[in-house]
Amino acid sequence: MTVIARAVPRAFTAAGSVIASLVIAGCAANTSTTSMSPSASSLPSPDMSAPLIAAPSPDPRVGLKAGLQDAGEAIWNLRKVSHTPSPEHFAGVTNSDLGFSGTNVIQGNYNGFQIWDISNPAQPRLRIATLCPASQSDVSVYRNLLFVSAEAPTARLDCGADAPRDPVSKDRIRGVRIFDISDIDHPKYLANVQTCRGSHTHTVVHDPNDNANVYIYISGTSQVRPAAELPGCVADANDPNTALFRIEVIKVPLAHPEQAAIVSSPRIFSDTKSGAEMGLVNTKTHGASPADAGATQQGRGGRGGRGGGRGGLTPTSTAADTARFNFQQAYNAVPALTLSSTKADSARYNKTVDSLSRAYNVPRPPMPAPRGALTQCHDITVYPSVGLAGGACAGMGLLLDIHDTPHPKRLAAVADSNFSFWHSATFSNDGSMILFSDEWGGGGAAYCRAADPREWGADAIFKIVNGQMVFQSYYKLPAPQTQLENCVAHNGSLIPIPGRTIMVQAWYQGGMSIFEWSDPAHPHEIGFFDRGPNDSTRAMGGGYWSAYWYNGHIVGSEMQRGLDVFELTPSGAITQNEIDAAKSVNWNFLNVQDQPHIVWPATFALSRAYTDQLERWKGLSASQVSAVRSGLQSAESASGGARRDALLKLATQVRGYESGSSDVVRVRWLTQSISDLAAK
């Protein structure tokens, strides 16, 4: 059930402070021709709710042979172009996200990053593998700059492998590394920007009104580091200077990227009326899956617990280690404060924790935020062309106004009792819809089993109406996976099929799924690739971290197996003309989370793609479709002025089809594409 955030005053008192919060209320590049996907209109439009093609039955993804590099495979409406195992020092270490530059793919890895030349996608060539350990090495590219995230306390400033062990270390990096990749075979480490919670992910934001700088939105999901390590970092939720309840914005001067620095810390979770920082709270969640009857887990995205402990004691543990361990055990047993806690509850909590701190001679931990309070985002997708961003912020999905790039403002927030961990977001090309993914279980659990609810670990699709998000439907990978395969919705991107909203998405060991959500109430799958489990005897993490379209191919980052490249094949769901039109879209570089506005150059493939669609959804009669195809073929065989005149005549002819069409918008797109061809 999707729910909308409404401001209802309620007091949460902690350490003598009263904090206003929200209650969740229930309720159901090139010269362009057409650059928009379908959008709401009063003009006649086709019914796109029905699947265009029947899925294979029985589903070939069920029962695939296990194996790391020799697993069984199932594929539908795709062709695997290549598979390349990870190189030495990276094999067996988790591959993460992807960035793109020219003919190169930059693949993050917990040991650093790899740069692959895919100018020949059938034989990717490793240009360089840079050892620079960090978790999770989220990567992005802007022109000649490469940005790499570091969040865990094990990463070193000098890229060394000897992780800092001290609680406070000047050798540690938790933030973003910046490399110059002008010479892409020899990346140069330029600078870093340290942040209080590290950088789990980051989002490069190009500001259409600022050509001198590029910005980075930092999403840190870890604990706040000590102020002794980075001055200004405050962990206490009640301190007005707390590092919680915010994101960081870094400005990178393109002429001097070494001068990159944090320029703002927007409090995007604050109460819009009172200004209280703890303004968004989600108490809606769900318990264990029916497939885990009797399990104690509560499906909170793998991010539960207060942390801070050292784990179990060992024979070499010191007295101080024992004290810290015993304190942590006792502290974890103290009932947590909630939104309904009274001032007396807060007083009792503080008295108990203070007493434990004195008893074990351990510093008291900072005051935590109440359970359900939003303190950070997991990932943010920005769409500068429409001035919006989608914040996947753990307990909620946020819609942000980013017209003032360094100072994003929250427009709307939604919560959903079916969602455990709001993970990532994707906009439709026209900006009228947004899709959020749910990383139920944190990506490490098997949550695509036959008995797992279809609404959990899925995508939720919304229309954007007057700055608010209106729920439409869920989409989840249709094929059940085994208990040995971690599976949940993860990273994906739009495929630039003109006039439609089609996406490829990674599902960890569920493989990749291609699906259409042009009708947001009726998404349906139209292609897939999957392998069997990594191992036949035990559960282990793996599968696709990301699957993105880039310049004519789909590139997948396989966490344990390496790098995969695919291409679409024509089917009853997608014609060759639609594929050729998609392949005509080319970018110099791409970060999927800095979502580019797709524009299609004037090509005969584009005009033919619209013609195919008008035939498919009966927007034109058979004789009209035949006339358009004949006219395009005749014009293409001509040249110079004869081609121009033939195209102008055809454009006029097609414009005359509007009055009797059931798909006027698409007829206009076709007319414009033909006119643009004439103008070339």
Image (cartoon, helix red, strand yellow):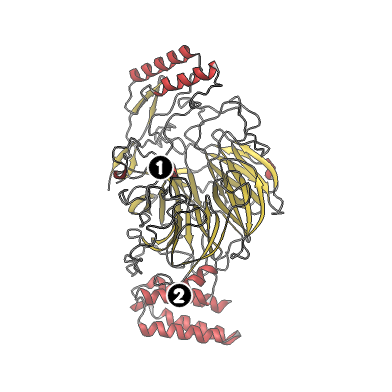
Residue 427 at x, y percent in the picture: 45, 55
Asked if residue 30 lies left or right of residue 364, the reply is right
Q: Residues within 10 Å of mark 1 (few under 14, many from 20)?
A: many
Q: In this picture, is 221 found above or below 568?
A: above
Q: Relative to the observer, which residue lies in front, 368 or 511?
A: 511
Residue 258 at x, y percent in the picture: 69, 42
Kind of residue indicated by mark 2:
Leu
Residue 158 sits in quarter: top right
Pointer 1 residue? 441
Q: Relative to the observer, which residue lies in front, 111 or 648?
A: 111
Going from the N terminus, do you reach mark 2 or mark 1 first?
1
Residue 528 sits in quarter: bottom left
Residue 291 sits in quarter: top left
Q: In this picture, is 163 found above or below 649?
A: above
Q: Relative to the observer, which residue lies in front, 427 or 507?
A: 507
Q: Residues within 10 Å of mark 2 (few under 14, many from 20)?
A: many
Query: SS class of the residue under badge 1?
Result: helix
Residue 198 at x, y percent in the picture: 56, 36
Residue 666 at x, y percent in the picture: 41, 72
Quadrant in which the C terminus is drawn:
bottom right
Residue sitting at the far front:
537
The residue at the point 42 percent across, 50 percent down is 489
The residue at the point 38 percent across, 34 percent down is 372
Kind of residue indicated by mark 1:
Gly
Query: SS class of the residue under badge 2?
Result: helix
Q: Relative to the observer, which residue lies in front, 177 or 651?
A: 177
Asked if residue 74 lies left or right of residue 262, the reply is left
Q: In this picture, is 18 found above or below 524?
A: above
The residue at the point 69 percent across, 54 percent down is 184
Asked if residue 474 lies left or right of residue 538, the reply is left
**Which label belongs to residue 138?**
none
**Which label belongs to residue 670?**
2
